[in-house]
Image: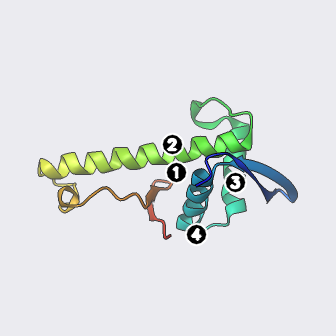
Amino acid sequence: MNTRPRKRSIVLGGRKTSISLEDTFWRKFRAIAKARRIKLTDLAGEIELRRRKGQRGHLRPAELSNAIRSYIFEIEIRRLHQTRTDLVFARRGHPTADPHAADQPARPDVFPDPGGRDLLAEG
């Protein structure tokens, strides 16, 4: 596995641009786009728009590559928080909890969509 960032080219708004991402982030980025059933360039466009607007009170990353990393971290944190919440609720017998959550390991392949839906990433 390559831990150094690699430059990759994508087209945003009709213009070719390069992003530098480590292989791990690139694979997650592709998995999220696939799980949401959108093109990689569309996901990059959403992240770029969010970066330019400085949405959600976050600091505005200076580069698209950093904005993609931040987006991936945000999704992973939400996923881990939801997994923890499901486990706690299931163990307490909470009526809104998934009754099987306490019996299941965390799902590293489930990505919460910023729109609020949980999506399954394949591959």
Which residue is drawn at the image coordinates 80% and 51% (left, top)? 18
Residue 29 location (% of width, % of height): 60, 56
The quadrant in which residue 69 appears is top right
* Residue under pointer 2: 74
Pick whichever of labels 1 and 2 is earlier in the sequence.
2
* Secondary element type, mark 4: loop
Q: Residues within 10 Å of mark 2 (few under 14, many from 20)?
A: few
User: In this view of the protein, can residue 96 be seen by the observer?
Assistant: yes
**What type is the residue that disc 4 sits on?**
Arg
Q: Residues within 10 Å of mark 3 (few under 14, many from 20)?
A: many
Residue 21 location (% of width, % of height): 67, 48
Which residue is drawn at the image coordinates 83% and 56% (left, top)? 13
* Residue under pointer 4: 37
For residue 44, which numbered disc appears in the image? Answer: 3
Q: CA distance from mark 2 to mark 4?
A: 19 Å
* Colour mapping used in the image: rainbow
Q: CA distance from mark 3 to mark 1?
A: 14 Å
Q: Nearer the viewer, mark 1 or mark 2?
A: 2
Q: CA distance from mark 1 to mark 2?
A: 9 Å
Q: Nearer the viewer, mark 3 or mark 1?
A: 3
Please say if the residues under marks 3 and 4 sit with CB atoms less than 8 Å apart: no
Please say if the residues under marks 1 and 2 sit with CB atoms less than 8 Å apart: yes
Residue 123 location (% of width, % of height): 50, 70
* Secondary element type, mark 1: loop
Is residue 95 placed above or below 55 in the rendered structure? below
For residue 114, which numbered disc appears in the image? Answer: 1
Q: Residues within 10 Å of mark 4 (few under 14, many from 20)?
A: few
Q: CA distance from mark 3 to mark 2?
A: 15 Å
Q: CA distance from mark 1 to mark 4?
A: 14 Å
* Secondary element type, mark 2: helix
Pick whichever of labels 3 and 4 is earlier in the sequence.
4
Pick whichever of labels 3 and 1 is earlier in the sequence.
3
